[in-house]
Amino acid sequence: MLLSLIADFRIIFERDPAARNWLEVLFCYPGLQALVCHRFAHRLYTLGLPFIPRLISHLARFLTGIEIHPGAQIGQGVFIDHGMGVVIGETAIVGDYTLIYQGVTLGGTGKESGKRHPTLGENVVVGAGAKVLGNISIGNNVRIGAGSVVLRDVPSDCTVVGIPGRVIYQSGVRVNPLAHNNLPDSEAKVVRLLLDRIESLERQVEELKEAKSRDWDLVANAVAKSGSESSSVSSQSCSLNDKEIEQFLGGTM
């Protein structure tokens, strides 16, 4: 337990540029304080001592805003940054050198018995407000974007974003815990692909209309002309929608 606490203390200086001295970290970092309380409570919990471990957990929650069930297994070098609103369930397992931001929930999905909380591998980054729910497995070097809701297993060396969480592979590249500015926007990418597909289909329709207009008789030409006018109105409406979509995308593509 002492080695784990030392690793928890040292990792703060590696991952938080605001950590200036050991006294400030020891007394002003609720994530470290919550882990100290949890490791003591967890030791008592594994010994089968009733009530006291839960009481320690409750007091730590009151003091730090971080709720960790004494039954949760927390690896060494874990850093809970800020930590307000973090909830870690009874059967959750958190691997070594995991970075957890505020508002994260490692919880269950119902009233199942037995293993009902997630298992996180090593060097995992869980962004602010992310929810990892159920008895699922998160591999090593995984990065979970802020606000994501993860309900399925995630292989190692991946990035997960969105609701529900979507996996974007990184081909074995190790995660940089402090790199948050290059998370992909999967929704924007899909919208852009759909727009490209619509434009391609519209071009094909126009080409078919032009081809038929050369062979049709006068009546067919009149019908084609009417269809062309309605297409022009639709195109103007599509342009307005494109402007709104561009604003939604925020220039990310």
Image: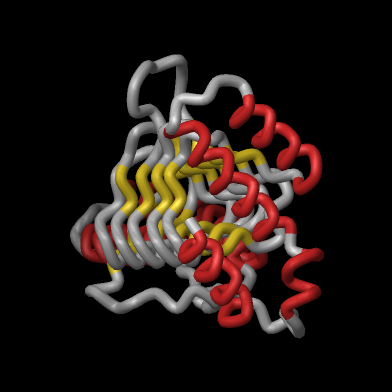
Compared to 197, does 250 lie above or below? below
Query: For the point 80% across and 64% down, which residue is it?
Result: 27
42 vs 17, left or right, is left
Q: Is residue 195 visible?
A: no
Residue 174 higher or lower than 241, as above or below: below
List x then y, in percent, for residue 161: 46, 56
Residue most toward the left?
215
Residue 25, how many percent across, how many down?
A: 73, 71
| Residue 123 pos. (x, y %) | 40, 67
Q: Indicate the position of residue 107 as horizontal and vertical percent values.
A: 50, 34
Query: Is residue 61 in view from this perspective?
Result: yes
Question: What colouring method underlies this structural image?
Answer: secondary structure
> In the drawing, does residue 156 fall left or right of residue 151?
left
The residue lying at 73 percent from left, 49 percent from top is: 84
**Which sits in the foreground, 83 or 54?**
54
Give me the residue at 39% from left, 40% from top.
118
Above or below 218: residue 73: above
**Is 213 situated above or below 181?**
above
Q: Quadrant of residue 233?
A: bottom right
State the residue in front, 54 or 169: 54
Q: 98 or 208, which is in the foreground?
A: 98
228, 246: nearer the viewer: 246
Report the label total.
Answer: 0
- Displayed quadrant of residue 70: top right
The residue shown at (65%, 63%) is 81
